[in-house]
């Protein structure tokens, strides 16, 4: 285990961690958030497009990527966060205000995100497959362990979400609403408001996950999330809806993903690529016992009035 | 001085039913006021309006003289109303302290001040004589303590008017005693109590005044000294109710259920028979193996050891399907958990478990016409209200849900009927009806095992009574010779009198 190898694992894990934390927050409040995937993708694009927009333009109309001010990619990060919140609030509108099925809403958002980013990419970058290279986020850290600030945020997100869920008043209410919204309501807690706030936070986290992906390669690539939102959601479930559990599942997946690289060429590539998934399933099925989901997960709350 | 609660001309309609029409209720400050009425009369609905869970379609509500304009829980709490619901409103995975302070948590900045919450709950508990461990998780507590938490929750919000919806339905007689003592002590501190109950004896003992509802209307309010149980029942139902049902002597035939050394969970080896045409009662303080016995005898739990034969078939480790096939009918302990599927219609619930029979399905497709026709018949025969087989089971009042379960199980024409608390939460009229139905099963030749924590029920119905204590049979008494006192002694581990 070289430091480079470990840093590699962390790089792969960072976007997953953020999305998984978003998943934990949303699911603990009782809302299934399959839309994590689409939220990440939309935010990855928002980061790229806004960073691009603030880059200085040369006399020939070309973007002077490397001359961009240090703040430029951070404007992109802000855009990614805002975009994540917005997409998630759309999910909230459909699931909480309208009371529609949460899985259907999530899938619709994911399909919409693929189409919308592709379309917008064509408009902004004149290519539906990928964007131009955009200004990079700085890398902070020591030796092999240098990451973008967005990736660093992912490591901080796990303890912060834990603290939020289990130590704050908001967290207590959020968990109560996820287990028994009727009970919370009788005490004057508004389940709809709590769930909307939870989804907004979930969107910000997943959005930042998308930013990490795009910032790593300083560009947007069509469908670049490639199912990471779903993997994060699986990690939430394998992690028993606990932030540390979900984080462990993300790291396991990332480690398996890294470990398959040296195997390539020795075994059939399809097998090598499916290794992380297989290993994750095996380890988790073998070591993680039965988990109990939040009791009100997926059930729209109808106020009886 | 203004009354604590004044509700005038209250109306509340639901999509399929009118729950309240022109209800009037006046509750004076510092009294214990009982609310009685048939299942579905609209009692719970009326109280939910008072605590801000429903907004009325018409009518005026005044709390301590102030008219309520904002029907939301937070407003009702602020006005001094607190309600302990029929189906508890708790978050089972959270602790006692967390449940009690939810909505008005002590904070340190954005953080939840757990220590202060726990102190506050402990302090409340000792102040009101309702001790409970603030750190225990709700799901680990027995119902009696869960209810105590509900009461603390209401008191923690400074409620001046406490509403309790059928608080004793799930309590043992001892727990009920202590609950009523608590209510009296709250009254002596100047608080007002409104409680709903179907147990007329308790209403007589605990209340100062009584309001009766029937079909969504107020029948009247009377001081408790002016009415006896028979009179209350008549106000509720609109006709005299027979409390004593006459019972012909049993004519038992061969054994239908043979239980030998059956053990599992808290059940520690019991042996008995139930013969065709007899009712065997199982009495005992709750938690002495009754639940396990019922679970094993309905295939929900595998016996640890011993045997249970139904019509000769050994089924102590079999699943529910085998039991039903052998001729079981079962009224389970918890109707919401095991008796009904809340989101399904009454009609679907009425054929649950029999949907594969040729009458109800062909090639896997449910025969809607047969189901609906039979459901309509059962709804009428068992007086399930609203009389609408398409209503969601969940929208029914507590007592009517119970009637759906009873109707389904009796319509199986069982060889063995296992009835656990068959009249829990049902009104006096329906109790009479269910008791008659059980006796009719006996007359038809069914073997009946009746598990109940209501001694009067066991005394009224059982031909033989087994007393469970510590998971074993502490004694067997002939029904005609049993007395409440004698059973009480056996139940608590004393020697047979
Ligand atoms: N949320 C709801 N949706 C539709 N109908 C409802 C709803 N709540 C209650 N009802 C109906 O309103 C009527 C009154 O119900 P309520 O629960 O007030 O009765 P209750 O007097 O408390 O009866 P019980 O003694 O059986 O608990 C019933 O017919 C019930 O089916
Ligand atoms: Mg009720």
Image: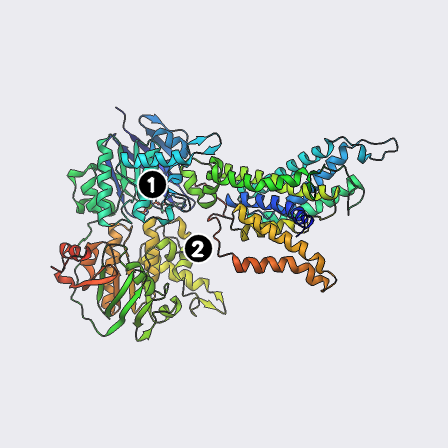
The residue tagged with tag 1: helix, strand or loop?
helix
Q: Crowding near pointer 2: few (<14 within 10 Å), some, many (20+)?
A: some
Q: Residues within 10 Å of mark 1 (few under 14, many from 20)?
A: many
Q: Is residue A151 above or below residue B462?
A: above
Of badges 2 and 1, the one in the foreground is 1
Label 2 belongs to which residue? Answer: B344
- The chain containing the residue under callout 2 comes to B
Label 2, secondary structure: give it.
loop
Mark 2 vs mark 1: same chain? yes
C-alpha separation, residue under disc 2 versus residue under disc 1: 29 Å
In the displayed structure, A27 sits above or below B57; it is below
**Viewer can see residue B279:** yes
Question: Where in the figure is residue B365, as x and y percent of width and height?
Answer: 49, 65
- Front-most of B237 and B286? B286
Q: Nearer the viewer, residue A179 or B192?
A: A179
Q: Which mark is residue B150?
A: 1
* Furthest-right residue in this view: A60
Q: Is residue A83 left or right of residue B28?
A: right
Choose top left, top right, bottom left or bottom right for residue B126: top left
């Amino acid at each position: 285990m070289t430091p480079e190898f470990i840093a590699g694992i962390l790089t792969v894990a960072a976007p997953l961690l953020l999305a998984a934390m978003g998943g934990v927050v949303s699911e603990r409040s009782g809302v299934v958030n399959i839309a994590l995937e689409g939220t990440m993708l939309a935010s990855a694009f928002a980061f790229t497009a806004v960073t691009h927009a603030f880059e200085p333009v040369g006399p020939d109309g070309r973007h002077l990527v490397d001359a961009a001010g240090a703040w430029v990619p951070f404007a992109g990060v802000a855009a990614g966060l805002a975009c994540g919140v917005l997409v998630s609030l759309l999910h909230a509108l459909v699931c909480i205000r309208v009371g529609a099925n949460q899985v259907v809403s999530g899938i619709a958002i994911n399909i919409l995100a693929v189409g919308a980013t592709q379309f917008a990419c064509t408009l902004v970058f004149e290519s539906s497959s990928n964007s131009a290279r955009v200004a990079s986020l700085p890398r902070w850290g020591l030796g092999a362990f240098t990451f973008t600030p967005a990736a660093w945020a992912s490591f901080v997100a796990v303890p912060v979400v834990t603290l939020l869920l289990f130590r704050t008043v908001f967290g207590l209410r959020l968990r109560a609403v996820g287990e028994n919204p009727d009970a919370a309501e009788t005490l004057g807690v508004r389940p709809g408001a709590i769930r909307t706030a939870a989804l907004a936070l979930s969107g910000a986290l997943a959005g930042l996950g998308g930013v990490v992906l795009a910032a790593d390669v300083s560009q947007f690539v069509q469908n670049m999330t490639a199912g990471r939102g779903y993997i994060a959601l699986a990690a939430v479930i394998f992690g028993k809806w606990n932030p540390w559990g979900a984080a462990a599942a993300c790291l396991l997946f990332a480690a398996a993903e890294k470990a398959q690289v040296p195997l390539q060429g020795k075994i059939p590539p399809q097998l090598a690529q499916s290794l992380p998934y297989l290993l994750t399933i095996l380890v988790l099925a073998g070591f993680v016992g039965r988990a109990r989901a939040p009791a009100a997960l997926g059930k729209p709350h109808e106020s009886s009035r | 001085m203004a009354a604590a609660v004044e509700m005038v001309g209250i109306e509340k309609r639901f999509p399929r039913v009118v729950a309240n029409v022109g209800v009037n209720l006046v509750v004076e400050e510092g009294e214990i006021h009982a609310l009685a009425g048939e299942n579905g009369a609209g009692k719970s609905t009326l109280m939910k309006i008072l605590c801000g869970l429903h907004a009325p379609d018409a009518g005026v509500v005044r709390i301590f003289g102030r008219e309520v304009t904002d029907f939301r829980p937070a407003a009702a709490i602020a006005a001094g109303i607190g309600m302990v619901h029929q189906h508890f409103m708790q978050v089972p995975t959270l602790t006692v302290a967390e449940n009690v302070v939810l909505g008005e948590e002590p904070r340190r900045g954005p953080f939840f001040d757990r220590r202060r919450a726990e102190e506050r709950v402990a302090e409340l508990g000792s102040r009101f004589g309702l001790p409970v461990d603030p750190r225990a998780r709700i799901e680990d507590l027995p119902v009696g303590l869960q209810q105590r938490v509900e009461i603390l929750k209401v008191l923690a919000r400074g409620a001046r008017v406490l509403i309790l919806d059928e608080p004793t339905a799930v309590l043992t007689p001892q727990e009920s005693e202590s609950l009523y003592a608590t209510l009296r002590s709250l009254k002596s501190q100047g608080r007002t109590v409104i409680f709903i109950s179907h147990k007329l004896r308790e209403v007589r003992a605990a209340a100062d005044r009584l309001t009766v509802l029937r079909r969504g209307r107020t029948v009247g309010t009377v001081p408790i000294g002016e009415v006896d149980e028979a009179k209350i029942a008549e106000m509720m139902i609109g006709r005299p109710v027979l409390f004593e049902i006459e019972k012909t002597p049993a004519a038992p035939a061969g054994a239908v259920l043979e239980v030998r050394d059956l053990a599992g969970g808290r059940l520690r080896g019991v042996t008995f028979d139930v013969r065709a045409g007899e009712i065997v009662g199982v009495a005992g303080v709750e938690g002495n193996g009754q639940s396990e016995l019922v679970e094993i005898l309905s295939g929900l739990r595998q016996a640890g050891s011993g045997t249970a034969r139904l019509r000769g078939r050994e089924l102590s480790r079999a699943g529910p399907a085998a039991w039903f096939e052998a001729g079981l009918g079962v009224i389970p302990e918890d109707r919401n958990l095991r008796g009904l599927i809340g989101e399904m219609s009454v009609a679907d619930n009425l054929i649950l478990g029999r949907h594969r029979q040729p009458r109800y399905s062909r090639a896997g497709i449910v025969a809607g016409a047969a189901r609906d026709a039979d459901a309509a018949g059962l709804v009428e025969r068992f007086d399930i209200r609203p009389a609408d087989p398409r209503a969601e089971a969940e929208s029914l009042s507590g007592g009517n849900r119970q009637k759906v379960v009873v109707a389904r199980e009796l319509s199986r024409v069982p060889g063995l009927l296992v009835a656990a608390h068959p009249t829990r939460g049902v009104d006096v009229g329906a109790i009479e009806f269910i008791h008659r139905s059980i006796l009719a099963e006996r007359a038809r030749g069914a073997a009946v095992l009746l598990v109940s924590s209501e001694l009067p029920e066991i005394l009224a119905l059982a031909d033989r009574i087994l007393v469970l204590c510590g998971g074993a049979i502490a004694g067997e008494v002939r029904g005609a010779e049993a007395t409440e006192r004698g059973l009480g002694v056996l139940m608590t581990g004393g020697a047979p009198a």
